[in-house]
Amino acid sequence: MVNMTDEFADLATTLRQLRDLAGKSLKAVAEPAGISPAYLVKLERGDVKSPSPHVLHRLAQTLGADYLELMRRAGYIVPDNTRTGGTLAHALSSDGLTDEEAAAVSAYLTVLRRQRGHA
Amino acid sequence: MLEGLDSASDITLHVDALLRSAEAYDRFPTPVDDIVAATGLTEAPDFVLDPAALVLLPKHLRTAMRSASRKLQGALDRRERVVHVTDLVTHDGKRRFVKLHEVTHDLLPHQQQLLYADDQETLSPTTRALFEREANQGAAELLFQRTGFTRDARGLAIGTAAVVYLAERYGSSLHAAFRRYAENHHQPVLVMRLHPVRNSDGSYTRYEQPCSSAWSQRFGGPPRYSRQLQPSQHPFLAAIDNPVDQVTIDDVNGEPVRVSMQAFDNTYSQFLLLWVPAKRKLLRGGLKR
């Protein structure tokens, strides 16, 4: 996996740097990622700031990059301000849980798992 | 609708592969447990609030957990790859949908990878909402075997009886079946889902009104209705109480169109099905003058 050396770079700069590092043309990256070279240019220029997560996943695969890091740079993964954290360990289906309630469910399911000997 | 998502082709690809590996195509009701098993996920026993586990939580989380347990329908434990469905979901069709919703969170690689995120990270609200829409759509694609439901609907006369039949055939809730029916029908079809009981002022509370693309084209985009609907302003509401089977609605060009309608009440919701009847062809290729 390619290291993202500039930890403060935005998504557009990161994508451009990753492609330069891989020594690949626009077409060589865009095609396997299922997007057009023109769209990749827009991403690299920052003209498109919110690409779909599934596009970022394909780009990460093509560029050998860390998908979650691209998600962070796109602002899709953000710091968890709940006191407990760990909310991404579970996907919850609900009728409008608050952040605190989602954190509580995650913590509860973790306790339950440990109790049942799956820790 | 699937077409409304950028990830539609990804969802289709993964759903198709899963339906094939579970040998679920053309089996009725859709074999949800086989689909879950084909993913390698396991199902936990019914999720109920266990006092012995609750007491081990920090105090501030105990209160939050109690309120959460009144809202939670299902959960996917990404690390243990376990699906939970809560005892709040009592309807079998709804339980099957919730399971497949959680399966989709695991099925789509760009969602599954969240397993490796740090404990002190979460999703932005818009990303969370997008992933929920994807999971709902994936669940519908699995439960209705992609194009299977729509293909079956095409062979049936339009009406609430067709929707009830299809819900039973695929093992879905009526709510999910009405939505699927409206969104994917090849003819102009609209479903209006209302609260089953009238308000004190005589109005109905509207929840949603999915429609087919043919309806949008005919009547100028998805309909815009207010949340409270008065029968005096919307004559189609008369179908709920009276044997009225047709009303006139102006199309996008202002031309009046006769629209058929039927009502169906399942005690949770009042469904109004509206559609434009197909013109009968008397001769192949139409009448020649």
Image (cartoon, rainbow, N blue to C red):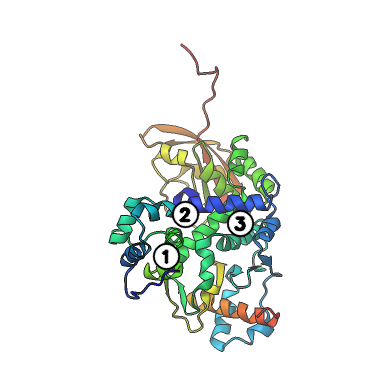
Image position of B230 (left or right of B264): left
Quadrant in which the C terminus of chain A is drawn: bottom right
The residue pinned by badge 3 equals B268
Residue shown at the point (61%, 79%) measured from the top left? A110
Mark 1–mark 2 distance (CA, rounded to whole Å): 15 Å
Q: Which quadrant would residue B251 be assigned to in this image?
A: top left
**Along the polypeptide, which appears first: circle 3 or circle 2?**
2
For disc 3, the chain is B
Residue shown at the point (63%, 39%) measured from the top left? B152
The residue pinned by badge 2 equals B7
Looking at the picture, tell me which residue is in the foreground, B228 or B155: B155
Are the residues at dot 1 and dot 3 in contact (C-beta closer than 8 Å)? Answer: no
Q: Position of residue B119 (x, y in %)?
A: 50, 79
The residue pinned by badge 1 equals B126
- SS assignment at label 2: loop
Q: Nearer the viewer, mark 1 or mark 3?
A: 1
Q: Position of residue B267 (x, y in %)?
A: 63, 55
Q: Are marks 1 and 2 on the same chain?
A: yes
* Amino acid type of the residue that numbered disc 2 sits on in the rendered structure: Ser
Are the residues at dot 1 and dot 2 in contact (C-beta closer than 8 Å)? Answer: no
**Along the polypeptide, which appears first: circle 1 or circle 2?**
2
For disc 1, the chain is B
Q: Nearer the viewer, mark 3 or mark 2?
A: 2
Quadrant in which the N terminus of chain A is drawn: bottom left
Outermost residue to the front: A23
Report crowding for label 2: few under 14, some 14 to 19, many 20 or more residues within 10 A (C-alpha): some
Looking at the picture, tell me which residue is in the foreground, B264 or A84: A84
